[in-house]
Image: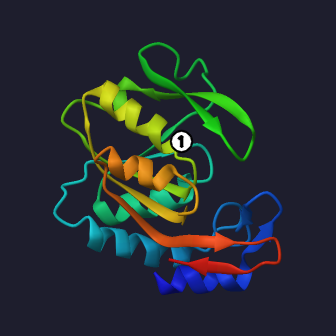
């Protein structure tokens, strides 16, 4: 998606260690007009999939997932990283490793909101090593629901996550695929 690629080139910042900082428009301060355009594109790409739930992980994907769910006319659901008394009990859970935070998280979704027969579109801001996406796929499978695909804003195609998930049979539609980036700020898209 050219619009997103242009925004990454203009406002994204490459940090040491393969970190792409896009917090001015994607995952801290949110550009809702951009989210609308992204959601329209995913709506086009996943048209006909009869999406009944949009699922993301706390916290960066929530804004994007909300707009996507609105386009599909279904609820947005997010996996929580902290079990609370509000979500304790009958939950679906798995452990995911956060590359950004350098730690493992147990993530939880209430069984009340994800059921057998649901057709789930997973939405996230980044796909790099794929741990978060694999965790969300596991939660959907534990619920007896079906993953219809993954809608990813930015995929670091030079890391293994996208290839691994695609080889597992899950359709991945990334709006910006980065082939390479360097500490000097140069970004090359696929």
The residue lying at 46 percent from left, 55 percent from top is: 162
Spot occupied by residue 92 in the image (x, y as percentages of width and height): 42, 23
Query: Quarter-wise, where is residue 42 in the image?
Result: bottom left
Name which residue lies at 66% across and 40% down: 98
Q: Residue at x 56, y 81 (%)?
A: 5
Q: How many marks?
A: 1
**Label 1 SS:** helix
Q: Is residue 185 left or right of residue 162?
A: right
Name the residue nearer the viewer: 96 or 167: 167
Which of the two residues, 83 or 179, is positioned nearer the viewer here?
Answer: 179
Is residue 38 left or right of 46 when viewed as pictured?
right
Residue under the point 50% across and 25% down: 94
In the displayed structure, 100 sits above or below 108; it is below
Q: Is residue 157 above or below residue 139?
A: below
How did the renderer colour the structure?
rainbow
Quarter of the picture containing the N terminus is bottom left
Left or right, residue 176 beside residue 122: right
Question: Where is residue 70 drawn, in percent x and y?
Answer: 37, 62
Q: Residues within 10 Å of mark 1 (few under 14, many from 20)?
A: many
In this view, 92 is above or below 64: above
Q: Give coordinates of residue 157: x percent, y percent.
A: 53, 63
In the image as oriented, which residue stretches furthest toward the top? 89
Q: Position of residue 116 (x, y in %)?
A: 22, 30
**Residue position marked by numbered label 1 in the rendering:** 132
């Amino acid at each position: 998606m050219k619009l997103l690629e242009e925004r990454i080139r203009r406002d994204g910042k490459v940090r040491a260690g393969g970190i792409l900082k896009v917090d001015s428009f994607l995952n801290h301060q949110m550009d809702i007009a951009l989210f609308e355009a992204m959601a329209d594109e995913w709506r086009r790409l996943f048209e006909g999939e009869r999406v009944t739930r949009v699922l993301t992980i706390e916290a960066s994907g929530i804004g994007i997932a909300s707009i996507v769910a609105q386009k599909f006319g279904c609820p947005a659901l997010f996996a929580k990283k902290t079990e609370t008394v509000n979500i304790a009990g009958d939950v679906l859970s798995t452990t995911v490793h956060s590359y950004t935070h350098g730690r493992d998280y147990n993530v939880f979704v209430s069984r009340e909101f994800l059921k057998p027969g649901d057709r789930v579109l997973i939405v996230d801001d980044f796909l790099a090593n794929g741990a978060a996406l694999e965790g969300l796929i596991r939660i959907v499978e534990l619920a007896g629901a079906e993953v219809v695909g993954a809608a990813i804003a930015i995929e670091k195609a030079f890391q293994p996550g996208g290839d691994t998930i695609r080889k597992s049979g899950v359709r991945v539609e990334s709006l910006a695929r980065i082939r390479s980036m360097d500490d000097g700020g140069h970004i090359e898209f696929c």
